[in-house]
Amino acid sequence: MASRAGRTLSVVPVACLVAGLVLVGCTPAPADRAIRTSSSPSWEKGAGAPEAAAFMKIRIPQGATEVKGAVRVQPQENVHLLSFVTSERTAESITEDLRPDYPLAVEGPSSSSLSGDGFEHLGLTPPQALERVRTTSACPPCVGDSRRRHIQGIEIHISEVAKDRVRVYLAAY
């Protein structure tokens, strides 16, 4: 009789564990988390430069022109694109604020981990297709940037447009 009671008592914790796992598995996703239903990327309607800048925790510089932005919804993570034309000094200041992994440098043809239509979606020539583009990247969690801890990485590309004017390309995910 004692062994039967012992078996019953050992079944209770296992039953509680199974019930807990079932409840967690059936809990709906939090409201601030998007549920991915498509395996192919799409562009978030109505999301533009303000949304991309807010995600990256940067201010679009006063006096910036040709400001463009978009959010590409993907199965793993969203990509926030932001581009604008500003002064060389302002572009370098923004880059420094993003705490890059290494200094801006021309790397032959600019490279990017961004696939798909990216900046072409904004009507821009992608930085990879331009010559003499200075490039760097930032990993906010790697450098302890608490303002941007929700961002895995930021690609930064800067190309000359005219005397002391440059186009800044930012892609954050």
Image (tube, grey):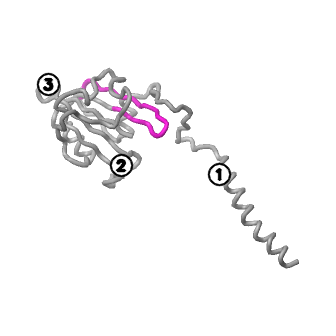
Q: If the image is split into quadrants, where does the C terminus sit?
A: top left
What residue did someone put label 3 on?
162
What residue did someone put label 2 on?
147
Q: Which residues are magenta?
A: 64-81
Q: Is residue 69 magenta?
A: yes
Q: Main secondary structure of the magenta part?
A: strand
Q: Residues within 10 Å of mark 3 (few under 14, many from 20)?
A: few
Q: If the image is split into quadrants, where does the N terminus sit?
A: bottom right
Q: Residues within 10 Å of mark 1 (few under 14, many from 20)?
A: few
Q: Quadrant of residue 107?
A: top left
The answer to the question of whether label 2 and label 3 lie on touching residues, with beta carbons closer than 8 A, is no
Q: Secondary structure at mark 2?
A: helix
Q: Secondary structure at mark 3?
A: strand
Q: Amino acid at mark 3?
A: Ala
* The residue positioned farthest toward the top in the image shown: 123
Q: CA distance from mark 3 to mark 1?
A: 56 Å
Q: Residue at x 36, y 52 (%)?
A: 141
In the displayed structure, does residue 93 sit left or right of residue 154?
left
Q: Amino acid at mark 1?
A: Val
Q: Residue at x 28, y 45 (%)?
A: 98
Q: Residue at x 54, y 36 (%)?
A: 36
Q: Earlier in the sequence, mark 1 or mark 2?
A: 1
What residue did someone put label 1 on?
24
Q: CA distance from mark 1 to mark 2?
A: 30 Å
- Count the numbered circles shown: 3
Q: Nearer the viewer, residue 119 or 40?
A: 40
